[in-house]
DNA sequence: TTCCTTAGTTGCTCAGGCACACTTAGTAAG
DNA sequence: CTTACTAAGTGTGCCTGAGCAACTAAGGAA
């Protein structure tokens, strides 16, 4: 079913025969963490360490690292751990993005990473010292990233923008309480184009994803109704499909 | 960045220091292969071998197996290889589905699989001897599969059905030449509900994804125009979004 | 009291999906 | 030769939801 023993990364688990005696790829998890910071979409990056044998020393990279077979029950738990370690956030929107694996992406050998993407409210995060927010002017990052993290980030941005067109994802970028104009601004920031007010309101309200709280946001002009996300935190899909079943 | 050396699956690549001396998870690739066989949506499964130390002996499973760091340049190439070995198909529609990894999914140890899903025309395939098509009555499989392959298959079916609502994916299940009613039947088989003829035709034709060939399918009644997929084989998305950018 | 700003609503138009009925082009049977 | 049958393909009218723009509402500031 697979190749024969070569020279390294061998395993004879469970005292079984020699079927697992072949080199294993490295397994990592990386997380693309988005938030709205300073009225713009930003991504969280960390700086690679400078130690001996470290690939891409001091280059910026997605937060992530090797799966720890002792600590991590599964991949999602591993991603949640990385996120928690860098931001302190414990219950974000976390979605699998895809995986990238090849012989060449990591100089240390054949490696495969499982990429996740997370949306968090800016307010909630307490950043680790080696982490920083990076803005994404024009939906892309200026800096070159370590490994193939540039590709992964580009895929994440594309996925986010795409899903924002027809889902309630931006709601997970909002603080606990927010107004409809707030939410619309976030949609507009992510999509990088203006949306029409009344259509937006109709769409969001009819999606039944948020509920008003008994408070208003006061300001120098007319107060705005405050809302919060409804309990069932599943993202809503604005169905506009073939022939809606019933 | 990760745990310390335990006992097995060690690696000291490139003669570097001891940073890679920790256990590595198993890395596999599995492929969910769909085709329309006998007018119904079916999935290709293979029977697990019966050898000593083999998990789930003789149970049906998704085609797949360990990444071969010598043969496989990257994950997609690995998936394409598995597909080719089981069906002979060389240029299918192949899309990444996601990854499943945990301490418990494989009795041999912490393992992560990268799952792909493929759509092929039935006619094109020459099956390996250990492979069989399984129908999916009501969009699910009767049999219990090895590992967590039941979960993976369920996810694949859900993803397929979902995407069929707004993409041209079923076109990849068609033979080289087909009629619009043929294509509509395939959509209906996958979605398991009837579609409206004229709306369907308008939609498909305006998507500019197929082109007529200078032939008709003749039968006991009015002949039907034959079509083929256009060159640019990218799947088409039937956009129905927020505020179509121009 | 008037003006300014932003929140939120209303009504009109237009595009596209859908249901349904109709036309078309073939075979087969009387 | 004509009529019936069937499936391919077209046209018509309704309805929903988006875009657009004008309007009302509710505050603060001058």
Image: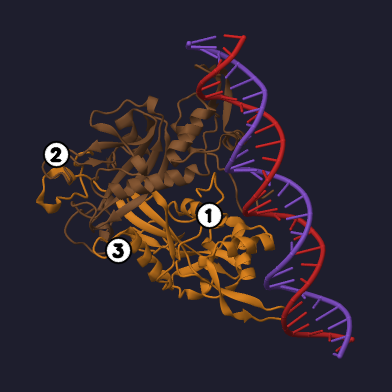
Chain colours: A brown, B orange, C red, D purple
| Same-chain check, marks 2 and 3 | yes
Vertical arrangement, residue B193 with respect to residue B6, above or below: below
- Residue at image x 34%, y 40%? A137
The residue closer to the viewer here, B67 or B49, is B67
Q: Where's residue A7, x and y in %?
A: 16, 59
Q: CA distance from mark 3 to mark 1?
A: 33 Å
- Residue at image x 21%, y 48%? B8
The residue closer to the viewer here, A36 or B18, is A36
| Residue under pointer 2 | A50
Q: CA distance from mark 2 to mark 1?
A: 44 Å
Mark 1 belongs to chain: B
Which label lies toward us, 2 or 3? 2
Q: CA distance from mark 2 to mark 3?
A: 36 Å
Q: Where's residue A216, x and y in %?
A: 55, 18
Which label lies toward us, 3 or 1? 1
Secondary element under disc 2, as helix, strand or loop, is: loop
Characterize the local packing of mark 2: few (<14), some (14-19) or many (20 or more) Cα atoms within 10 angstroms.
few
Q: In the visual, does B216 lie left or right of B221?
A: left
Secondary element under disc 3, as helix, strand or loop, is: loop
Vertical arrangement, residue A96 with respect to residue B128, above or below: above
Vertical arrangement, residue A94 with respect to residue B129, above or below: above
Quadrant where the image shows the N terminus of chain B:
top left
Q: Is residue B110 visible?
A: no
| Residue under pointer 3 | A2
Q: Where's residue B39, x and y in %?
A: 61, 69
The residue closer to the viewer here, B83 or A18, is B83
Q: Is residue B10 visible?
A: yes
Name which of mark 2 and mark 3 comes first in the sequence.
3
Q: Which mark is residue B163?
A: 1
Characterize the local packing of mark 1: few (<14), some (14-19) or many (20 or more) Cα atoms within 10 angstroms.
some
The residue closer to the viewer here, B141 or C4, is C4
Q: Quadrant of residue A2?
A: bottom left
């Amino acid at each position: 079913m697979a190749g024969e023993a070569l020279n390294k990364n061998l395993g004879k688990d469970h005292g079984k025969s020699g079927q697992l005696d072949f080199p294993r790829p490295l397994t990592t998890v990386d997380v693309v963490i988005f938030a709205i910071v300073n009225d713009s979409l930003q991504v969280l990056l960390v700086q690679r360490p400078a130690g001996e044998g470290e690939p891409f020393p001091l280059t910026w990279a997605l937060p992530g690292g090797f799966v720890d077979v002792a600590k991590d029950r599964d991949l999602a738990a591993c991603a949640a751990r990385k996120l928690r370690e860098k931001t302190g956030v414990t219950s974000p929107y976390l979605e699998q993005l895809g995986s990238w694996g090849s012989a060449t992406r990591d100089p240390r050998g054949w490696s495969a990473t499982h990429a996740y993407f997370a949306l968090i409210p800016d307010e909630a995060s307490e950043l680790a010292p080696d982490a920083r927010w990076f803005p994404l002017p024009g939906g892309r990052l200026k800096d070159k990233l370590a490994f193939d993290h540039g590709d992964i980030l580009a895929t994440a941005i594309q996925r986010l923008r795409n899903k924002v067109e027809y889902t309630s994802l931006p709601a997970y970028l909002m603080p606990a309480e927010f107004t409809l104009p707030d939410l619309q601004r976030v949609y507009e920031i992510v999509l990088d184009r203006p949306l029409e007010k009344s259509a937006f309101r109709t769409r969001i309200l009819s999606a039944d994803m948020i509920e008003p709280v008994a408070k208003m946001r006061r300001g120098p002009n007319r107060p705005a109704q405050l809302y919060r996300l409804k309990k069932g935190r599943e993202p809503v899909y604005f169905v506009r499909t073939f022939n809606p079943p019933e």
